[in-house]
Image (cartoon, rainbow, N blue to C red):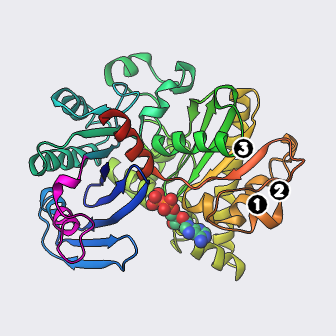
Amino acid sequence: MNVLVINCGSSSLKYQLINSDTEQVLAKGLCERIGIDGRLTYQKAGCDKEITEAPMPTHKEAIQMVLDALVNEKTGAIASLTEVNAVGHRILHGGEKFAGSFIINDEVIKAVEDCCDLGPLHNPANLIGINACMELMPNVPMVGVFDTAFHQTMPEKAYLYGLPYEYYEKYRIRKYGFHGTSHSFVSKRTAEFLELDLENSKIIVAHLGNGASISAVQDGKCVDTSMGLTPLEGLVMGTRSGDIDPAVMEYIAKKENLDMAGVMNVLNKKSGVYGLSGGLSSDFRDLEDAMNKGDKKAKNAIEVFSYRVAKYIGSYVAAMNGVDAIAFTAGIGENAPTVRKMVMSYLGYLGITLDEEANAKRGEEMVISTADSKVKVAVIPTNEELAICRETVALVK
Ligand code: ADP
């Protein structure tokens, strides 16, 4: 069957049409600047990208344009919309209500609405995407796949913050974790690739992209993860600070004369490796280039990033009382040998040794530890769209 995978952001929408039998991507692309002006990128498998500028006041027009492109007489990937058999929606926040994926119905929509205060930027956009698809494809089954679901197996000791318990009861303040689809996909694939028994394994997944998070997966279930109530906690990221002393917020507010929204803007958009590099870039390609030319701040940024990753790995070894395998994934995890090497330089105490030659490669599934390394370290490319497609098929079939 053909599954349309939709990932709505506040002003963007990414999509892929996947044939679930062959797992081939038939077409993919994105809509950007929704509500501003509008730009559709469409790429049919084996063809060049096409870019169309056209007004997209809301996600509904954006989805209509995607559907039109998919069935376009000349460049469409399918002949008619009847060839879209199901839609899988990525949904950011499922709170405590969703520990798995669900067929979308009124009850699910209501529950996603209830989680809007937990994911104020994404959940409303996700809902608009769902409603638009329901209007345009009323008879096609739709599935919601939640970024938080995989982490719902965390025990209380991992997800409770050291705050008054009533805030958890009244406001649901706790650690939820994100990138769950990726952590689930990569931990399963790591076990397969390294021939481990998933049900009896301790795997640490480092999802290092623009947004970055780590998870500890024991016997196939998440037992801890670095992102929290929101995707701001944990690792130092492209532009997000990750963990800081919470008192820094008040201090910045006073010194810079900022209100809470202003401080949050600094922590979300002006911090991370971007902030550390003095505003040079949030992209590790630029930072590596600058570091190699002797830029001290770029070097600091990469070192702070890698050190934080290594410390989280150490804490998850403690959480699981051991580790069988560590997997690097996402943009940086798959493509930045310098970062992987730096992280692994802290892990000698675990009996880990790096295979320098393997580590020099980029973007492929591979083992990067030596044959005698006590813990296997691998690069496992993530594929969130394929994971959403598989979840969708499992529920719809
Ligand atoms: P997200 O999905 O969170 O936007 P990605 O997983 O696509 O992020 O990762 C994007 C990041 O991956 C880029 O910002 C860049 O830092 C890093 N990256 C991509 N390719 C390379 C490369 N060849 N070398 C180093 N870093 C890379």
Q: Which mark is residue 354?
A: 2
Quarter of the view holding residue 219: top right
Taking the image as drawn, is residue 104 in sight?
A: yes
Q: Which residue is mark 3?
A: 194
Tell me, yes or no, whether the highlighted magenta stretch contains residue 68.
yes
- Give the secondary structure at mark 3: loop
Q: Are marks 2 and 1 in contact (CB under 8 Å)?
A: yes
- Residue type at mark 3 is Leu
Q: Of marks 2 and 3, which one's residue comes earlier in the chain?
A: 3
- Residue 245: image x %, image y %? 56, 42
Q: Of marks 2 and 1, which one's residue comes earlier in the chain?
A: 1
- Work out whether 226 lies above or below 55: above
Q: Which mark is residue 341?
A: 1
State the residue at coordinates (50%, 43%).
233
Badge 2 crowding class, 10 Å Cα cut-off, few under 14, some 14 to 19, many 20 or more, is: many
Residue found at the far bottom of this picture: 293
Bounds of the magenta span?
65-85
